[in-house]
Amino acid sequence: MGIAKATYLHDDKYKIDPNAGIDIFYNPSPKLTFQLTGNPDFAQIEADPFEFNISRYETYYSERRPFFTEGNEVFSPSGRQRNSGFYQPLDLFYSRRIGKKLPDGSEVPLLVGTKAFGRIDDWEYGGFLAVTDEKDFEVDANTETEQQAYFGLGRIKKQIFENSSIGLLVVEKHTSSYDNGLVDIDGAFRGSDWQVAYQLAQSFYNSQGGFAASAGMMVTKENWLTGIRGRGITQNFNADQVGFIPWKGTSEVVGLSGPRWYYESGAIRQILLYVGGFWGYEDADAAHDVGGLIGYNMNFRSNWGFEINLTTGKSKDRDVKYDSYEMSISSWFNISPKWNGNAWGGYSKTYNFSREYLAFYSWFGTSFGWHALSILNIGTTLNTFIEGNPDNKIEDITFNSRPSISFTPINDLNLRVYFDNVYVRSTDRFQRFIIGFLFSYNFLPKSWIYLAINEVQDRSDEFDSLENLKPNRLHATSRAGVLKIKYLYYL
């Protein structure tokens, strides 16, 4: 239950609201769960990490809100490969569409949401309902309105052949102007060393509709690995209000195969070498992309490893035909209980849709966590994005970092602070700051007190009382503090 919320308006003025909300979590049996949230506030959730996107498609953000993440396995498609990540089913239900962020940065209010999920013998089932409120927002000095909406979802999944499954998913968003949703059948068939997974979906937007499908196969023998995946989405497939499928009018197939070696002793645990190819088609360019790939993966017994990938091919974007290539490397380190880390980087020749030209693009980054003391954890993520220009020179460089500190003086109490900033070389200035503070106290089993304070600063346009444009500067666009209590009551 939220107790109070203070929201920054402008010129050091705040709006303080009681902001009462409620969350109910009920387990009538170990195999059945009910959840309900009313007027929720997710201020204790950290802001999304910065994502640099030069593609023609929108950026994907993972779900962080507890109400939507709890029990989401039931609503997920079959066959998602978490270890290799080679086959990733289409996200036909994308919960970030509920209470979504609008173009001016504001969010659609979630009035109420409820769901139930459980299991009976070989059947899994789940249902979901949510209502969002009407919200006005600004786009290019014009006021537009996001209509009040009703979301509904139903999911059933049956285990078959001991280790396989088949499922049905229905999702819909209803407003006074339209109905948008889809119906999906998916499944996964598994053996001791192989898996085949698939999706077949039809969308509807009022009376119009389209189709989408994806499939993936992975065969993992003792000394050999083979994988193939593909997807196809018609141009009129539209599930924009409930799912994340931005690749309309596209098809692709990727295949790879290669040997792997396991070692019983010594510093090296495993080596994997693979080669393959890809084919793709986009209606937007009326062209086929084809190419090949090669990769090398090595894992060590001291809990670190790396992978190198190289792809090259023929591509076409915006009527520009070119030879594309990309080389990337990633590594991971968990060699000590005190610290862990990751590093990654890459270089490519590709079309930059944010600047509308063909050029090189490079990126590199690192993250690490340090368990400095039994009560203190320190970590950070650092990213650098380098954009080239058609003259093969650097056009711009964007830097992003996200340091954090977590302090746990006693087992049930935690203080966490993080800072997220974006610096752009061409402006020689920071373009964004995010500061977050969270106090959490677990005063009873599954019962918490939260105090969250968040502030976002950027360089968006500011106007004075006479509607004159102010000089560009970093200024607070969002600042809020929330006090919440979460109490588990046993019936």
Image (tube, rainbow, N blue to C red):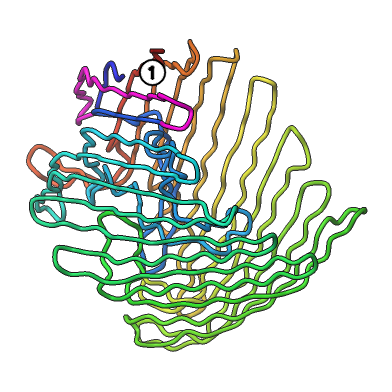
Q: Which residues are magenta?
A: 8-32
Q: At 18% from the left edge and 44% from the top edge, which residue is drawn?
A: 150
The quadrant holding residue 227 is: bottom right
Q: At 49% from the left edge and 41% from the top edge, which residue is drawn?
A: 121
Residue 65 vs residue 425, the one in the foreground? 65
x%, y% of residue 222?
79, 65
Residue sticking out furthest to the top: 443
Q: At 51% from the left edge and 25% from the top edge, which residue is drawn?
A: 416
Query: Where is mark 1, residue-wise?
Result: 486
Q: Quadrant of the N terminus?
A: top left
Answer with left or right where residue 136 lies relative to residue 65.
Answer: left
- Report helix, strand or loop for mark 1: strand
Q: Quadrant of the C terminus?
A: top left
Q: Is residue 278 magenta?
A: no
Residue 293 vs residue 229, the one in the foreground? 229
* Above or below 416: residue 473: below
x%, y% of residue 194?
65, 64
Q: Amino acid at mark 1?
A: Lys
x%, y% of residue 50?
44, 49
Residue 4 vs residue 233, the one in the foreground? 233
* Above or below 357: residue 157: above
The quadrant holding residue 86 is: bottom right
